[in-house]
Amino acid sequence: KGPDGNSVVLDAPDGLIIVDTGRHPEHSAKILAFARERGQPIAAVVNTHWHLDHTTGNWDIRQAYLQVHVYASNALEGALATYLSKSREQTEAALADPTTTATQRAQIMRARAVTDQPDRIRASQVIANSGPMTIAGRPLDVHLAKFAASEGDVWLYDPETKVAIVGDLVVDIVPFMDTACVDGWRRALDEIDKTSFETLIPGHGPAMDRAAFKVWKTAFIDFVACGRSQAPKEQCIAGWEKGAARFIDDAHRNYVRGAADFYLTTRLRSSPEEQQRYCKPLKPEA
């Protein structure tokens, strides 16, 4: 099954802040159980981006805490009209397929409920710009990368603890480029690098120190450069595997090779128009 993005819990004067809520009900159940154990309400959710493996659990939390505020960019609106609309068509095909298992069907129906009822995950507090912000009584530096790993990537830096929470702007095993504006992504990594973080929490994978982030960032830059060159694809894939070796476990090695090949084809070596597809709003403003 598709993975859940990392969730991060921050203490705040008004309750807990949850950064990203995962995809599967088991994931959000753990978040709710943690809040009960702490004896604190969940006061706010921050979504780093609109991908469903980071947002689907919003609904579970909203049902348990009716007053919770959800902070995110407004990129969901364009995604609903484009990317998620296309995914909805694929969902119907999967549900009609007799080989789809009951477990798979339950996961598909959960995703379909989100696209059919987007208020389940939609922001109540739209993040439109970067700057200092107080969320649930806790001051944070909130950053908006308008076109990077997706449209409207939100990432947080907490100067007090020197922690950066960056969503899928960093993903340990391979950069997920499905909805990526690669040049904007590089700029976002530079902005992260300018902070004084000591610990970085990626969208997927374990926390990193600054040295590990530097290794990942260099591997990303080299992979993009190779992908845009005339080098054989196998050379670029091998380069990523070598540069990011410390982040790739044996269980994901074959996945990484396949994903890197896919992103080389669909993003880095696609037509100029396709390469710029996610460097502008998914849904043009009227």
Image (cartoon, grey):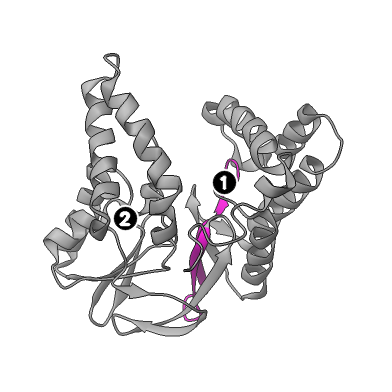
Residue visible at 32% across and 25% down?
94
Q: Position of residue 264 (x, y in %)?
A: 69, 37
Q: Earlier in the sequence, mark 2 or mark 1?
A: 2
In this picture, residue 132 sits left or right of residue 16: right
Q: Residue 205 location in percent, x, y?
A: 49, 47
Magenta part of the protein: which range?
151-175
Query: Is residue 6 something that shows in the picture?
Result: no
The residue nearer to you, when weighing 190 against 279, is 279
Report if residue 74 lies within the magenta region.
no
Front-most of 48 and 271?
271
- Residue 98 is left or right of residue 286, and the answer is left
In this image, 92 relative to 180: left or right? left
Dot 2: what SS?
A: loop
Residue for point 34% across, 54% down:
55
Q: Which residue, given by chain and number where applicable, does mark 2 sit on? A: 21
Front tag of 2 and 1: 2
Q: Quadrant of residue 198?
A: bottom right
Q: Which residue is mark 1?
A: 172
Q: Nearer the viewer, residue 12 or 156?
A: 156
Q: Residue at x 58, y 41 (%)?
A: 173
Mark 2, other Cα within 10 Å: few <14 / some 14–19 / many ≥20: many
Q: Which mark is residue 81?
A: none
Q: Which residue is most to the right?
A: 230
- Determine if residue 46 is in view: yes
What amino acid type is highlighted by mark number 1? Asp
What secondary structure prevails in the magenta region?
Answer: strand
**Residue 202 in picture, x, y percent from top left:** 51, 55
- What x and y, as percent, mark residue 115? 30, 48
